[in-house]
Structures are given as structure tokens and as C-alpha cells.
Image (cartoon, rainbow, N blue to C red):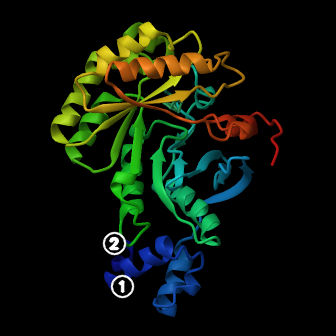
Amino acid sequence: MDWLVDHGEKPFKAQQLFAWLYKHRELEFGNMSNLSKATQAKLGESFEVGALALENKQVSSDGTIKYLFRTQDGLFLETVLMSQDYGYSICVTSQLGCNMGCTFCASGILKKQRDLSCGEIVAQLLQAQRDLDGEEKRISHIVVMGIGEPFDNYDNVMDFINIANDDHGFGIGARHITISTCGVVPSIKRFADEQSQVNLAISLHAPNDELRSQLMPINNRYPLKSLMDSLRYYLSKNNRRLTFEYILIENVNDSIEQANELADLIRDLNAYVNLIPYNPVDEKGYKQSSKSSQLAFYDRLKRRKIQCTLRREQGQDIDAACGQLRAKKMKGLDYAS
Ligand code: SF4
């Protein structure tokens, strides 16, 4: 709005422009029919619509679509669109690479080059939704769970969420949006204070400090006690339920003893656990838990009265593990389209 007012326009035009960009998903200022020709020209001289170019798109046999986008400065990022029982869910990327160094993650192979701008995060949603517009289908859920740590790019991610949630934007309900963090404690407290309706998920992946520090270096900075304290603070300020993401890796974190330890760790929290069979990454050497271990882990949590789900795998035939497509592109390897 400030830009429009500074350039002699009425403030209400901001709302019209917002709707053209996000609701009608118009690419040309010249087609924004309720803006004057003079306003269209001013906008065209100063801005360009479309922060990302589509580099590659893979469609899995189960309907999952993986996009590889190129930024204007020639860098690559991934976005995954999943067809679910309830509609379409998009997983957006918040940073180019990631410095958190989780040992099981393809994204950590490539260190952070920079944060994504709000416009670049919005562009992922726009491009995927444009793909669905022809079929009159709609993205109804967002997870900020792609490459990067969203709370390491807090302001841009929050601006993105506001645009996605706004009725004049995409109008996606806050309760249909989830931010996933590896456990950046100060940002969890900041998020708690916002009292947002957006869901909070924690990538936990280990039930004790020793193992979690091996898998996720962030745990050295913010060990489980400080993480759990920040989550209790979040729950005290927000009448919401937390999600814990827990990938099941063979012989690493999938034993019955570890299921018991996990139940002990979180039993006093209003939370549920999303168990995810690990999607193997070539370079990492970890394997997916066997089906029997997955089910035994799930059953033990259930017996311990922990609410949990065992997620079905999606897009395994298209490099769906976080960061795989981008990692291949950056290394100059071929990928099938
Ligand atoms: S799991 Fe998430 S936080 Fe950890 S390295 Fe990968 S992208 Fe970063």
C-alpha cells in the first residue's frame, strides 16, 4: 500500500491489486481491468509478476507433483504438491539450502545460500495453484516443511502466511497451515506470543538428547529440556495441539524402548505424533524402518495412550525426500521428467 500511496494512488487500490495477484492470479498488469491505464503503466515500470521460473516438474504415480523452480539469481528450490483425501496440500521451501545440518536430510547437503523472500515463497503457491486452476481444483492446505528452517527466516515466512491466509489473497484458513521447525527455541516463544491459529509442528526424530544431538545439531544449542519448556510455554498461550514429526530410521530411532522413551517425553503435552517412514537419501546411508518395526513403534505409542498416525509414503518414485531433486540439479546430475 505504501508504494501506491507514495506514487499518488488511492489506498483502496492496494486491495484491488492484491486480489488480482493472489485471487485471480493475473500475470499481466495490463489485464487488471479495474486499475487505470496510468496505474497499470506505473506498476509495469517498477514490478514484474512471477519471482520464479519453472525448471522441471515430476509427477509421481500417486499424483504427487514435485516442482523445481529457478530464482531470478539462478538458484534452485523445490516445492511438492500432494493430492490428499481432503484436497491438495503444498509443501513450500523457505530457504535456499539449510544450515541446520540434520544428518538424515538431503537439504543439509547443500548449505544455505540465502533466505527466500516472501515473494519467492508466495510464488511457489501461485505457480502450483495456477497448475490446478485449469482443473478447477484448489490448494487447501499448506505446510512450511520444505527445504530450510522456517524460523530461521521468520519475518518472510510470516508475511507469506498472512498473504496465504488473507481473504483477499488465497483465503487458506490458518488452521490449514502448518509451520514445522527443528526446534529454534527463541522463535518458538516468539511464535507462541503471536497467538496465531497456524499449526506448529516440531521435527523431533529422537526421544533423548544423546541421539537427537547426533541426528540434529540444533539439539546441542537447544537441548530437549529447553525445547520442551518452550513448547509448554506455547501451549500455555495457545489453546492448540502440537504435532511431533518423527521419521522412522532402521536401527537408529525405531526400537520399542525408544517408543517408550518418546511416550515418557511428551505424555503431559497436548500433542500427537506423526510417524513418517524415512525416505532414503543416497548420500546418507540410513535405511527406512521395516514395516514390522514401523507398526510395532506405532502400536507401542498407542498402548501408551499417545495419539499418533503412521503416514503413508508419497512420491517415492520421484526423489520426494526433502532436497533430493535440488541436490541432483546442483550437482549437475540428470533427472527424469
Ligand atoms: S530436516 Fe529441515 S532443518 Fe534439518 S537440515 Fe533438513 S531442511 Fe534443514
- Judge whether 55 appears above or below 265 on screen: below
Residue 223 appears in view: no
Residue tagged by mark 1?
8
Using a 10 Å C-alpha cutoff, classify the residue at mark 1 as few (fewer than 14 neighbours), some (14 to 19) or many (20 or more): few
In the rendering, at what x and y percent does residue 326 appear?
68, 39
Q: Nearer the viewer, residue 177 or 308?
A: 308
Residue 83 visible (yes or no): yes
Query: In terms of secondary structure, where does tag 1 sit?
Result: loop
Is there CB contact under 8 Å for labels 1 and 2? no
User: Does any atom of ligand 1 lie closer than 8 Å to the CB of label 1?
Assistant: no
Picture coordinates of residue 63 (x, y %)? 67, 51
Image-based side of 225 in relation to 302, left or right: left
Residue at 30% in and 14% down: 264
Q: Amino acid at mark 1?
A: Gly
User: Percent position (x, y) of residue 280?
Assistant: 66, 25
> Tag 2: residue type?
Asp
What residue sits right under mark 2 in the picture?
A: 2
- Residue 262's quadrant in the figure? top left
| Residue positioned 28% across, 51% down in the render | 197
Q: Nearer the viewer, residue 117 or 169?
A: 169
